[in-house]
């Protein structure tokens, strides 16, 4: 029932306790109300294990150059909380292998910059990209690879092209998400699912045979492996790197 302003004024003027009672009722209702959606990224995440931070912001603990496991990492540094390619050293790989997971990170390249996130790498492979598929990291506007959708930012390198207009310009941060669950893979860029494919499917095999990986029989075959950040000779920065293993 809705009361008019004059009605309330009359009640107050009469010295009733209606206002305190109403305020008390509002407080009790608020206390008993169900909480709204959480703003926490962890609370909003999909099913799976807890999130694990892969880069602590201050060191390269948990990482090594792919070609020199067990040795201190070279060519990469932690600078103001950002994992940065600063010199020669080669691809930077996780110490651990992963099978099914959801990986989130942010990346930024300089003008003409080129890098990539490579996953399920066979640690016995000669180079990371001969066995591990790659989510491309690139300055689309200035690097030659940006002219071909199959090698543009967010692509499953050389096999699946993302839509245009999703990646941000060089020197700006991009949010990336990589979901690898069994044979199913998704690439997300700045909140948009840009690529989706099934490893080993007839479509995937046809694309592989038409790509530079036609003679790489180990490419995309490993059920688990290392994750690497590619050293392509350019400055690239990564931050907020975290991973959640999936059942």
Image: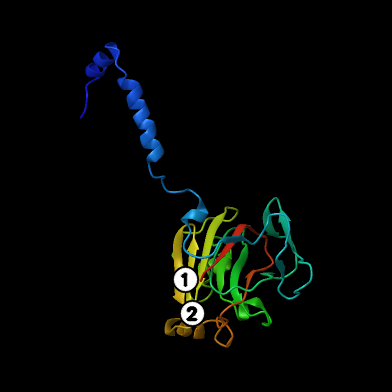
Q: Looking at the image, is 137 positioned above or below residue 202?
A: above
Secondary structure, mark 1, is loop
Spot occupied by residue 38 in the image (x, y as percentages of width and height): 46, 48
Badge number at residue 161: 1
Residue that carries the numbered disc 2 in the rendered image: 199
Question: Between tags 2 and 1, which lies in front?
Answer: 2
Res. 195 visible in picture: yes
Secondary structure, mark 2, is loop
Closer to us: 202 or 140: 202
- Give residue 50's quadrant in the image: bottom right
Spot occupied by residue 152 in the image (x, y as percentages of width and height): 52, 67
Spot occupied by residue 158 in the image (x, y as percentages of width and height): 52, 76
Spot occupied by residue 141 in the image (x, y as percentages of width and height): 54, 60
Left or right of 35? Residue 230 is right
Image coloring type: rainbow
Q: Looking at the image, is 178 positioned above or below residue 30?
A: below
Quadrant of the snapshot with the N terminus: top left
């Amino acid at each position: 029932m809705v009361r008019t302003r004059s009605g309330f004024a009359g009640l107050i003027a009469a010295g009733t306790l209606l206002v305190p009672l109403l305020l008390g009722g509002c407080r009790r209702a608020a206390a008993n109300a169900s909480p709204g959606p959480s703003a926490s990224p962890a609370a909003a995440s999909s099913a799976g294990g807890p999130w694990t931070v892969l880069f602590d912001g201050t060191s390269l603990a948990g990482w090594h150059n792919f070609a020199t496991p067990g040795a201190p990492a070279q060519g990469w540094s932690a600078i103001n909380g950002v994992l940065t390619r600063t010199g020669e050293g080669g691809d930077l790989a996780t110490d651990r292998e992963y099978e099914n997971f959801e990986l989130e990170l942010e990346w930024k390249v300089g003008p003409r910059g080129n890098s990539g996130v490579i996953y399920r790498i066979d640690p016995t492979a000669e180079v990371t990209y001969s066995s591990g598929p790659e989510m491309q990291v690139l300055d689309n506007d200035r690097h030659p690879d940006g002219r071909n959708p199959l090698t543009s930012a967010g692509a499953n390198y050389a096999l699946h092209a993302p839509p245009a207009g999703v990646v941000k310009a060089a020197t700006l941060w991009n949010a990336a998400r990589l979901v690898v669950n069994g044979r199913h893979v998704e690439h997300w860029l700045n909140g948009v699912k840009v690529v989706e494919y099934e490893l080993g499917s007839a479509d995937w095999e046809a694309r592989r045979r038409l790509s530079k990986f036609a003679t790489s029989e180990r490419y995309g075959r490993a059920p688990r492996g290392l994750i690497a950040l590619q050293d392509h000779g350019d400055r690239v920065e990564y931050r907020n790197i975290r991973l959640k293993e999936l059942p």
